[in-house]
Image (spheres, rainbow, N blue to C red):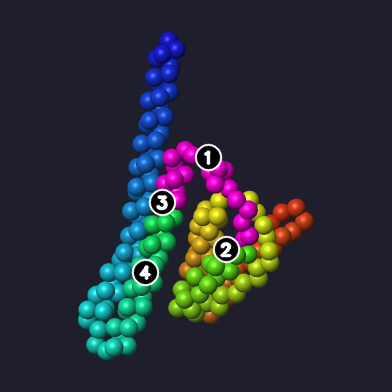
């Protein structure tokens, strides 16, 4: 009976691992579809460009799409590492959220400008212990969503600050 119970547990863990892998693969395919469609569309515009300005604009958009795809792949790889069951706390370091917030604002600025969104930061030193890559992914996704779903000519503010016994991070749209 103990051997049978152990085998059943092992088979259940294997089933769960396969389900996680299937979900991850489906999520990755879904997430990559959008930037790849944008890259394709911009390449087609470049092929049929009637002026240097049209070609240059499509080339700039193409590079943005490639950069977005690269960031997405980095995020997916980071998430895949999490799915391996390793303890994420082993990668914890002290991270200043202000550095990440400012970097995200700089990275998101071209996207915000294209959407006619004013992007601002209010980042004061805010030290936390965590995984820098995962915190960066979190901030990127929140900032991206705030810009993507805010109406044109609105304002998005990325901020963080150290409070008495906690750190406050906010994205206001």
Task: Mark yes or no: residue 138 visible.
Answer: no
- Residue 166 — which label? none
When the figure is inspected, residue 170 is found, relative to residue 5, above or below; the finding is below
Q: Secondary structure at mark 4?
A: helix
Quadrant for the C terminus in the image: bottom right
For mark 1, what is the residue? 87
Other-residue count near label 4 (Cα within 10 Å), few / some / many at <14 / 14–19 / ≥20: many
Give SS at disc 3. helix
Screen quadrant of the N terminus: top left
The residue singled out by tag 3 in the image is: 77
Vertical relation: 27 (above or below) 43: above
CA gap, disc 4 and disc 2: 22 Å
Contact between marks 3 and 4 (CB within 8 A): the answer is no
Estimate the spatial distance between the alpha carbons at disc 1 and disc 2, rounded to whole Å.
Answer: 23 Å
Q: Within the image, what quadrant is residue 54 found in?
A: bottom left
Q: Earlier in the sequence, mark 3 or mark 4?
A: 4
Query: CA gap, disc 1 to disc 3?
Result: 16 Å
First in residue order: circle 1 vs circle 4: 4
Which residue is drawn at the image coordinates 50% and 75% (left, top)?
109
Q: Which residues are magenta?
A: 76-97
First-in-chain label (2 vs 3): 3
* Residue 108 appears left or right of 8: right
Q: CA distance from mark 1 to mark 4?
A: 33 Å
Query: Closer to us: mark 4 or mark 2?
Result: 2
Q: Residue furthest top?
A: 1
The residue drawn where x is 44% and y is 42% is 83
Q: Which residue is mark 4?
A: 65
């Amino acid at each position: 009976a103990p051997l049978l119970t152990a085998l059943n547990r092992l088979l259940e863990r294997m089933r769960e691992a396969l389900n996680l892998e299937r979900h991850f693969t489906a999520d990755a395919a879904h997430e990559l579809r959008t930037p790849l469609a944008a890259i394709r569309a911009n390449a087609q515009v470049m092929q049929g460009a009637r002026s240097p300005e049209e070609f240059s604009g499509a080339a700039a958009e193409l590079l943005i799409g490639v950069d977005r795809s690269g960031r997405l792949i980095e995020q997916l790889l980071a998430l895949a590492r999490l799915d391996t069951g390793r303890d994420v706390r082993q990668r914890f370091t002290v991270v200043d959220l202000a550095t990440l917030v400012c970097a995200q604002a700089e990275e998101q600025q071209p996207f915000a400008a294209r959407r006619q969104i004013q992007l601002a930061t209010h980042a004061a030193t805010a030290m936390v212990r965590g995984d820098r890559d995962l915190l960066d992914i979190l901030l990127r996704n929140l900032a991206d969503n705030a810009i993507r779903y805010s109406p044109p000519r609105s304002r998005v503010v990325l901020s963080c600050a150290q409070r008495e016994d906690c750190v406050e991070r906010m994205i206001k749209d």
